[in-house]
Image (tube, helix red, strand yellow):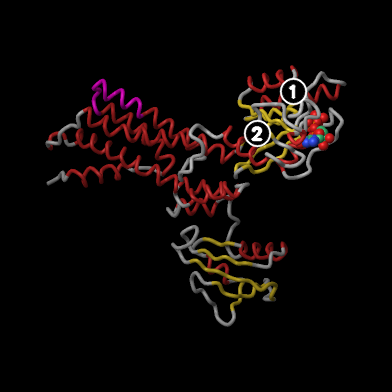
Amino acid sequence: MRLSGRDARRIAGSMLRFSPNPEWRAWTAALAELLDSSGAVIDQVVVTFFAAPRSYTAEDVVEIACHGSPVVLRHCLDRACSAGARLAEPGEFTLRAYLNGRLDLPQAEAVRDLIEATTLYQARVAAQQVEGSVSRRIAPLKEQLVELISLLEAGIDFAEDDISVAPAEEILRRLEPIQQGLEALVRSFSFGKLVHAGFALAIVGRPNVGKSSLFNRLLEQDRAIVTDIPGTTRDSVSETASVGGIPVRFVDTAGIRAGQDAVETLGIERTYQAIADADLTLMVVDASVAMGVEDLGIIDRARRHGRYLLVANKADLGQVVEDAVPVSALTGEGIDTLRSQILAAVSPEGGFAQEEGFITSLRHEQLLRESIAALGQAVAATRSAIPHEMLLLDLYGALRPIDAITGATTADDILNRIFATFCIGK
Ligand SMILES: Nc1nc2c(ncn2[C@@H]2O[C@H](COP(=O)(O)OP(=O)(O)OP(=O)(O)O)[C@@H](O)[C@H]2O)c(=O)[nH]1
Ligand SMILES: [Mg+2]
């Protein structure tokens, strides 16, 4: 149980007994007894006190580690509440950390991503963002923008003080790296999105080519029914697993052929839907048999709906199909190669971004795009020699969305910079 706020120690103290003395040494764990309202001991607990501002919320924080019995925890909460605490809202500790300036907004958002991570790789990316990797990339760009704004503001506000108005080339020269930096960040989202949300992969093909066997192999669990009877899978089955740290939703489907009965025909309809919904389709054929018109028809459909990979399964029986990834769901041969081909097929141009600080949030991407659009207008305005008052509107338009990511720039920030860099006022 975590208590945060000015009264954290008082409230915790009302239900604890330290042996021998009250012990509130900061950043040190202490053994204590948790008491019920009549003073009877109900648990032996470890108490850690984090003194403000060196705590998660930057307030005084007390953490009480009980033995995990729901009854004890419930009691612990009740006692804290009757001593003046209240239950935290969802995310409130992180909100307080943000409000108290301990975390910026991208860091706070990354805490949520970290908690929600389903693969270790997602967790690692989120942890980098909690460390401030996104802010570190945005901060210098914002800095340059604020500097340009200050320069133009100074030219307007203090025109009589002999500050030369910045020439158009100078403004354009300063705008360019800001635009480029923001665009690189937006590009990083094509990879970031993949890491954050993963993608859907449909496994399709004619009956009996081994789709369900391949599905089970990729998931490393015996999830779908496999038999040698064509038409075994009647309905789409989906399951999520990590491929290279990216969560992939695999969808096994009913084999496509002229339906034998009403149920199978409905199942095949679902296969078509799965192809339409997937980010990538694995088109499975039997490696040992030459492809027929049915196979070509399915390939054609997959191609029309986006990216697909041709996979020749049952390669252990010999391979006559070419230009396909040979695998054997039976022996496991070729599965690792298939996994890397899957990643290569969905990864954005230029392959995997290994750099730190790529953005994973749609909100950030949209804000950055807004900023880029406003900068584009600023460039056009500069080229057509529009007065700086008007140009500034575009630059503030570019700054606002960035502020929505990193926290606001106040008029003071800009004023301070004007006075710091121009020695006005003599
Ligand atoms: N030799 C060999 N046999 C395989 C391989 N993969 C699957 N099989 C066999 O092929 C038969 C069909 O496998 P399934 O995985 O059920 O095929 P499916 O494509 O899901 O079939 P439907 O659900 O009917 O569309 C089974 O007898 C499997 O044991 C493989 O790589 N090599
Ligand atoms: Mg099947």
Which residues fall within the magenta stretch?
A: 375-388
Q: In which quadrant of the rendered view does residue 400 lie?
A: top left
The kind of secondary structure element at disc 1 is loop
| Residue 128 drawn at (x, y percent) | 49, 50
Q: Check residue 379 for magenta coloring.
A: yes
Determine whether 107 is above or below 53 in the image.
Answer: above
Residue drawn where x is 75% and y is 32% of the image: 318
Three-letter amino acid code of the residue under disc 1:
Ala
| Residue 280 drawn at (x, y percent) | 63, 30
Q: Between 349 and 292, which is closer to the camera in this rendering?
A: 292
Report the disc number at residue 200. 2
Q: Check residue 54 for magenta coloring.
A: no
Determine whether 104 is above or below 16 in the image.
Answer: above
Inter-mark Cα distance, 2 to 1:
28 Å
The kind of secondary structure element at disc 2 is strand
Residue drawn where x is 44% and y is 44% of the image: 134
Visible residue check, residue 248: yes
Determine whether 139 is above or below 275 in the image.
Answer: below
Q: Between 127 and 215, which is closer to the camera in this rendering?
A: 215
Report the disc number at residue 122. none
Q: Is 2 placed left or right of 297 in the picture?
A: left
